[in-house]
Image (tube, rainbow, N blue to C red):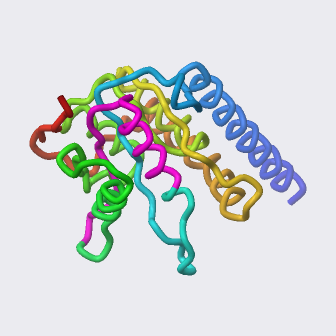
Amino acid sequence: MVRILKWIFVMALVTVIALVIIYMSISKQAESALYHSINKVPAKKAALVLGTAKYMIGGGKNYFYTYRIRAAANLFKAGKVKAIVVSGDHSTKYYNETSKMQKDLIKAGVPSQYITLDPLGIRTLDSVVRAEAIFDLKDYIIVSQKFHLERALFLAKAKGQKVIGFTAKDIPGTAAAYRMKAREYLARAKAFLDVYILYTTPKFHGKKKKVNYKK
């Protein structure tokens, strides 16, 4: 029994160390591609906004969502991008992230003709792979919070894409922020496995779709 407990302890310790190494490695790789200022971010043809629910499970406003919309609208209005692709989960008729994102971007001042929907961005990996495969984006800006952007940039660069990230405002010190950071350790480990071990592909594919760019 003692030997079994020691083995379990060693395996648990190795797992924790591996999770920390992967987490820190992905953060380090993303450093040079992250931009926090609208004035300093280079202009690109398009932005990919990663989806999340507009409201929390308890019914309150999800500020991760709110700040991503605001960041994307600011990029467009500052002339940093000429089109926006919103990518999120609309795999069932009962849940639709992308239509809400589209409506709120329009409210924020982005003309509807320059917003393209990717309703099959079920996961971050699906969103970045489909960005090139479906929407022909190869050199673009990803918009999300820093903790999420680092993983998205890791996935996109592993697929050979030329991407940078523009950070949406975070909500540090909140229970939601702590939950998301804790979840991110497992999400990054899964991303590492998807890229180097499992060679995971998007759940859904489809035909090419044209993105309309502002002239």
Quadrant placement of the C terminus: top left
Q: Nearer the viewer, residue 116 or 52?
A: 116
- Image coordinates of residue 154 in percent, x first then y, are 49, 30
Q: Is residue 181 visible?
A: yes
Q: Residue at x 86, y 60 (%)?
A: 1
In the visual, does 210 lie left or right of 176? Answer: left
Find the residue positioned furthest to the left.
207
Above/below status of 105 relative to 176: above
Q: Residue at x 54, y 70 (%)?
A: 61
Indicate whether residue 86 is drawn in magenta: yes
In the visual, does 1 lie left or right of 35? Answer: right
Indicate whether residue 208 is drawn in magenta: no
In the visual, does 5 lie left or right of 61? Answer: right
Q: Residue at x 29, y 43 (%)?
A: 85
Q: Is residue 189 visible?
A: no
- Image coordinates of residue 50 in percent, x first then y, are 41, 48
Magenta segment boundaries in residue numbering: 67-92
Q: Quadrant of residue 107?
A: bottom left
Above/below status of 6 relative to 82: below
Q: Nearer the viewer, residue 130 or 139?
A: 139
- Image coordinates of residue 8 in percent, x first then y, are 78, 52
Tally the numbered discs.
Answer: 0
Q: Quadrant of residue 155?
A: top left
- Image coordinates of residue 103 in percent, x first then y, are 30, 62
Q: Residue at x 63, y 49 (%)?
A: 170
In the visual, does 185 lie left or right of 70? Answer: right
Find the residue positioned furthest to the right.
2
